[in-house]
């Protein structure tokens, strides 16, 4: 296989975009909208396998986005797919859950130290929003504190105050603090009123759009925990991007800081639609009072996929493989930056790597570079963190690095031409 | 097969409930919680096939709930499952949609007269809430009018004002009217302020919990349309229960009243997780401004299942089969009521049938009757509408009627014993 084909075609993708523009507002919506990406990116895909992806025109990519997180063990992992298919062949959506719900709930409770109970759902937004509702139910309070710039899904309690289609009332109970800044958190508590804080919602690392990734300081995590304890608010960890990649027990386990509630989705069923809210004992009654449901929430096939995913991760070296592959990538990128004389920032834990260019206004330089990477058969994102899977072996990372190196070279030559 | 086994066991279900009580708040949450049902009902299921269902203890049921709607052509319909499996074997969740998104969007736009565009998502709640957000985005207004007692999902704009975990601000922009009551709708418009009404959200029939189903009057549907036109609000039809069962083009087509936006889910992929918001041209720009997305929304396998479901329904006699089966059931139930001298109300369109007992406070009599039905191998609901599928043939309806007849007899004999 060559990752740099002589000619990358775009005909089928172009035709599909024209058709989509008629029947979908803007031709596409949400985070997968290729309009946010350089013009070299395809909108439509044909297939995935391991850490490789093919667009509708047959162009191949080493995929560093993993479908924006859901693909943890590689596309179409045989054991996971077999588990899901075997369950689907018996029953998926039924008039109640199958025994797999209990088995999966027990698995999460065993695996995640803070968790005593589980509530399964479909979207990441379902899990974070259900966490907020449970916190309000348990406390009888209204206010939710979130870090400015953080993403917790599309529900209006967490979207920008000027997001189209939202009302002032939607945002009336959301108060902002700055990530890694305890004084700003104290100020937010004061603004909300300590006795009206239902929850502080926080991501395990700072992974905001258009920003280098930033780990939490030990003092911030511990201070946040102490503030929640002091005011009687739930610490809700939004582990939707980090969960499993940064550890089986939740992404703040290594800091020794445990949340009351944690929201998981994306990777937990290796691409099958599933999310879950986990909670500790004191929040169980608040959860029990909430009516939370959806037509497909108890579907058994995604639960079979999740059980297989968790078992494979538990018994194998997937966590270590992701870390090693991410480190190889980050180290290679840093070396390439140096060798091309480019000021780049490689940030993030290895499993959620990211690259930016120093002083790059509105990620313009990153857009050009990412477009070149796409042409060279590497799919990454110019201003959102990437995701590594356990299917990224040394040779696929090295192949990705060939593509990024070529892209740096092109950037450099364009600099020279300016 | 006998639908009235000599002994119906409960051992495995009982053991699973005990395990679930440890790791799930209340042992289960949402509409599938068996705590809402008579004690004869199982909580956990093993498998489904056609219109039959087996619980974890091997007890068999003729299923009149169809998984609360998603199962339209019968459980594990071979063609639908093959389409989903073939797509899953190539690619499901990827870094963008597959061509199936375009094909499915075009199919809906062709099939539903009011629709010019589509936005796919996962939950019914996603589709109704996205409809509200799009209406607000397009109009710049805040208020949403809904019928008192209606269910539009779990998002807090539509839940009870005293729902645990919700705030006064969540409900501040929701104004209530009475279904089939135009003066109450006019009063709601006046209360909201005509210039601040973003949307009127309405179900195609009145299908509220604990109530007989009630069709819309022609005058109500036309009047509601006229009011929306007059004040410039979106008419959002929540067709999540009715969609496809009551017609391919939307459930108000036969009334000749077309919505601006319609929300579909449940049956559209015969049990695979999928929902969609459909909209007409004037609302496209409002939709385009909204950031709506989810990790699994563009999954291709459910779209393949939906394309197969729609094709089978289009080319076959599924719609007619559902109507015929529902009529046979409703007629049989009415005859049984008469023959047992019981005052019962059989309501709903045949595809969404329902039965209640006259003067039955809090559905207590219905609970006893439904419990007997479950013992007799018929799975229905004492206070929520049922769902018929195209897999319900005459013999399965007749078998269900044997079970309901036996349950009426038991009710009657208990009356005598009182």
Image (cartoon, coloured by chain):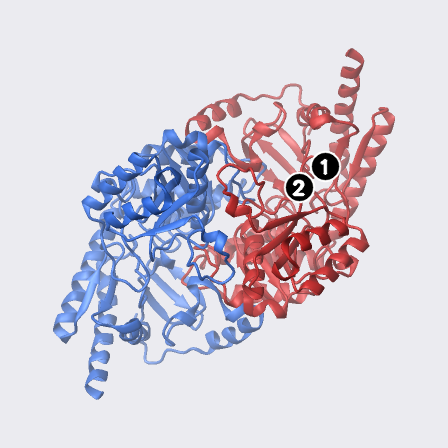
Chain colours: A blue, B red
Q: Nearer the viewer, mark 1 or mark 2?
A: 2
Q: What subunit carries mark 2?
A: B
Which residue is at 79% across, 21% downward? B409
Query: In the picture, residue B47 is in which quadrant?
Result: top right
Residue B367 is left or right of residue A66, and the answer is right
Mark 1 surroundings: few (<14), some (14-19) or many (≥20) residues within 10 A? some
Residue in the foreground of this view, choosing between B103 and B136: B136
The answer to whether one can see residue A2 in this image is: no
Q: CA distance from mark 1 to mark 2?
A: 10 Å
Q: Chain of mark 1?
A: B
Q: Residues within 10 Å of mark 2 (few under 14, many from 20)?
A: some
For image coordinates 77% across by 58% down, the residue present is B223
Res B287 seen here: yes
Name which quarter of the figure residue B379 lies in. Answer: top right
The reply, left or right, for residue A32 in relation to residue A112 is right
Secondary structure of residue under mark 2: loop
- SS assignment at label 1: loop
* CB atoms of marks 1 and 2 within 8 Å: yes
Above or below, A363 against A321 in this view is: below
Residue B211 numbered tag: 1
Q: Position of residue B12 (x, y in %)?
A: 51, 24
Residue B158 location in percent, x, y? 58, 46
Residue reaching furthest to the top:
B417
* Residue matched to label 2: B149
Task: Please give left or right for residue A314 compared with residue B121 in the image.
Answer: left
- Earlier in the chain: of badge 1 and badge 2, it is 2
Image quadrant in which you'd find residue A257 = top left
């Amino acid at each position: 296989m060559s990752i740099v084909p002589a000619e990358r075609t775009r005909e089928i993708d172009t035709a599909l975009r024209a058709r989509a523009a008629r029947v979908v507002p803007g031709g596409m919506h949400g985070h997968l909208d290729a309009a946010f990406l350089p013009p070299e990116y395809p909108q439509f895909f044909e297939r995935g396998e391991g850490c490789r992806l093919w667009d509708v025109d047959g162009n191949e990519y080493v995929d560093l986005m993993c479908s924006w997180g859901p693909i943890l063990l590689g596309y179409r992992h045989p054991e996971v797919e077999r588990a899901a298919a075997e369950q689907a062949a018996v029953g998926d959506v039924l008039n109640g859950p199958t025994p797999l719900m209990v088995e999966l709930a027990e698995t999460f409770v065993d695996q995640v130290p803070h968790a005593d109970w589980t509530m399964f759902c479909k979207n990441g937004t379902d899990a974070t929003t259900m966490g907020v509702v449970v916190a309000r139910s348990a406390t009888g309070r209204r206010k939710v504190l979130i870090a400015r710039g953080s993403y917790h899904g599309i529900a209006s309690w967490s979207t920008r105050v000027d997001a189209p289609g939202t009302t002032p009332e939607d945002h009336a109970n959301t108060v902002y603090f700055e990530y890694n800044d305890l004084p700003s958190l104290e100020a937010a508590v004061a603004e909300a009123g300590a006795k009206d804080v239902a929850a502080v919602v926080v991501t395990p690392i700072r992974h905001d759009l258009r920003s280098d990734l930033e780990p939490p300081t030990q003092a911030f995590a511990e201070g946040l925990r102490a503030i929640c304890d002091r005011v009687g608010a739930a610490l809700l960890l939004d582990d939707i991007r980090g969960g499993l990649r940064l550890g089986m027990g939740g992404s703040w386990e290594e800091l020794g800081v445990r949340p009351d509630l944690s929201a998981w989705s994306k990777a937990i069923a290796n691409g099958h639609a599933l999310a879950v809210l986990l909670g500790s004992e004191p929040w169980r009654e608040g959860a029990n009072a909430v009516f939370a449901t959806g037509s497909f929430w108890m579907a058994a096939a995604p639960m079979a996929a999740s059980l297989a995913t968790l078992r494979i991760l538990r018994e194998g070296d997937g966590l270590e493989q992701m870390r090693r592959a991410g480190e190889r990538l980050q180290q290679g990128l840093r070396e390439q930056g140096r060798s091309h004389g480019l000021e780049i920032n490689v940030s993030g834990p290895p499993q959620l790597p990211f690259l930016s260019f120093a002083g790059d206004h509105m990620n313009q330089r990153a857009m050009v570079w990412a477009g070149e990477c796409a042409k060279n058969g590497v799919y990454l994102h110019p201003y959102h963190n990437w995701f590594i899977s356990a299917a990224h072996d040394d040779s696929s990372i090295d192949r990705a690095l060939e593509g990024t190196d070529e892209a740096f070279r092109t950037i450099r030559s364009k600099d020279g031409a300016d």
